[in-house]
Every structure is written in structure tokens, then in C-alpha cells.
Image (cartoon, rainbow, N blue to C red):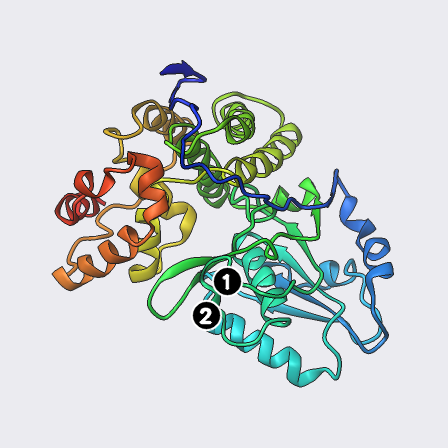
Amino acid sequence: MKIENGLKKASITPSTKTQYRNFPMVPRVIFGSGCFSQLGDILLPMRKSSEAPFIFLVDDFFENESFVSRVPLMFNDEIIFISADEEPKTAQVDALVARIKENYTELPSGIIGIGGGTLLDLAKAVAILLNNKGLAEEYQGWDLVNKPALYHVGVPTISGTGAEVSRTTVLLGPDKKLGINSDYTTYDQVILDPDFTRTVPKEQWFYTGMDCFIHCVESLTGTYLNAFSQSYGEKALELCLEVFLEDIPEEESRDKLMMASWHGGMSIAYSQVGIAHAMSYGLSYLLGVRHGIGNCLVFQHLEDFYPEGVALFKKMLKKHNIHLPKGICTGLTQNDFDVMINVSLGLEALWENALGSDWKNIMTAERLQSMFQKI
């Protein structure tokens, strides 16, 4: 074991059962202040016909004339504003797919997601389901998608989730919260314009940025760690520590957190996240707790598993005067706890990454419930 950047690293000795996956990456990305203005030029050669629209799925925070005037609409292109107050659901994906198919004679030329993790995941899922039969819930899992998604573009307006670069789209289904993990999920094009993050409220900025920080901690200390994941995770961690523990100019902070999100998302392509994410999924499924704050609510209590990471996290809380809500799990019934436990323990890869192959003997249902009861 060695310690770097304040975090204890797992050994990266290759496992005898390793299977090397040929993962996709985002093939095209543009970065820089104001680069959103080039979206029209990027989309033009991808348009299939005047009857095949581009559909823009946009966080309703941007529902104003100023933003709409910047969107490069042509022919029968459409903007659909969507609230990000709740996490994306499989039923929501199905409804959007049905609406688009009903309103247009041709499949769209592409789907553009503009917003945070919720909108980015929705856009990825809609692009997949427009070109694959069935319902979104049927594709929750690993490598269940058979046909390529429609062309899709991601424009993150907040930094931290890594949704802009990942091969998953995390959805709340009727009986689980789980991603559509596939080689067809990854965006074809990403627009990284730090100007969009100017208007993010402080607490949301912090919670979403901590999603990236926790990605790094869980990846770098996990049993799945390898040199590929480590290289991205270490860079993302370095950038997070600069943004959240140092005093750097706002413009530099926006740029660096956007790149931390990118590297943090890449760090789990060949690795996995861990306990905080598994428990956060349970909170989200039962109580609707948003992913970023859910990770924070859990992570503060994980000193036994991530001591160095939790110590750094608490320094960041103090520096930015963030006060996490308390009593989230007060008053829950045993059935409520059972639901959260079943959702969380169903994410076996996350637990194995965090605790090793013997994780089922380490993390019992009783121990997990005691951890939820602290929140």
C-alpha cells in the first residue's frame, strides 16, 4: 500500500480473472469559454434531412429568451425543457421517446442534452431507446443494448457527475435504480463550456463537485484499481483539491472543476465506484434524495472505509460552510430500510470494488442498516 494525495491506494497487481474490455470514449470534444456558440456548425453536417429534427432536452433553469436565442434551431427542431428537480426515471424516458415518435415522421437527426447529470442521462437514454425496441427498464444493466443510439451530444452546465463522459445513464426504474451501461451510451460529441457553470448555486456546486471527489476516492482505493483508472483518478483528485481547498480565481476554478469531472468520469471506465454510491442509490430510490447530496450524506459516515477521503471531505465542508441536513432516515419503517438495503446491496460490483470478493460477509444487511440509521 502507498499513500499519495492523502489517500491510501489499493495495489494494482493484475488479477488472474481480469477480462480486458474494449471500452468506448467520447470521440469528439470541444472545450473553452464560449464554445457553445459553435454547436450549430457541429450539428449541420450531422443533419439527415429537413424532416429529421434535432431534439434539445434542456434543464428548465434555462427556459428564457436569452438562452433560446443561442440554440441553433433549424427547420422543425425542438427544445423540450425538463425539470431536474427529480432524478431521471425509466418512465420519463419512455414518455419522451413516445412523444418524439408521435410528433415526427422521421427519427431525429440527433438528441442534444443540456444540463446537469439528470439531463445528460436523459438524453443518452432517449437516444438509445429511439433506436432500440422496448422500454427503458429492459435495458437497465450491463451490455443489454443491441443497436447503436441515435447521434447524441452532451452539454454539461454543472461540473462533477462525469455523466458527459461515462458509458452509463443512471435511471430510477420501477424496482431499482440502475444504469443503462453499454458501449452505445457514450456521447458522440461533448461541448465543455465553463461559462454555463457561472450561475450554479453554491450548495449545488458543492454537492455535485463532491460527486467527482467521491468518484476519485472510491476508484483510487478500490480493489478494481488499475493504472488506467489511477491515472485519471489522480488527476481528477488533484483538481478537486485545488478547487475545494485552495483559493484560486473563479474562472480558473470553473475550468478545473469541469476537467475534474471529465477525468473523474473516465477514472471509473475501467474501475468502479464504491460504498457511498451504493448507499446513495438506496436513498435516492426510496426517498428521492438527489445523487450529489446523497453521496455527501453517506460519505460523512464512512471513516471506517475511507479515512483519508472523509477527513479531506470534512475540511471542504468547513471551508465552504456547508451544513448537511440531518435526520433523513428518522422515522423510517423496517420495510423502508429493507427496500434501501436491497437496492444498495444489489450493486454487487460496487461492493466488491470497495471491500473485495468477501464483501458479503463484511457488509451484512444489519451493518448496512446501522449505517443508514446515522443519516
In the current view of this chain or complex, which residue is farthest to the front? 16
- Residue 130 x %, y %: 63, 72
Place residue 132 in its image quadrant: bottom right
Q: Nearer the viewer, mark 2 or mark 1?
A: 1
- Residue type (three-letter) at the residue carrying disc 1: Leu
Gap between marks 2 and 1 measured at Cα: 8 Å
Image side of residue 214 versus residue 150, left or right: left
- Residue 368 x %, y %: 19, 45
Residue at x 16% of width, y 64% of height:
335
Residue at x 19% of width, y 38% of height:
362
Pick the front one: 330 or 87? 87
Q: Which residue is mark 1?
A: 144
For the question of whether residue 298 can be seen, the reply is yes
| Quadrant of the snapshot with the C terminus | top left
Image side of residue 84 versus residue 154, left or right: left
For the question of whether residue 324 can be seen, the reply is no
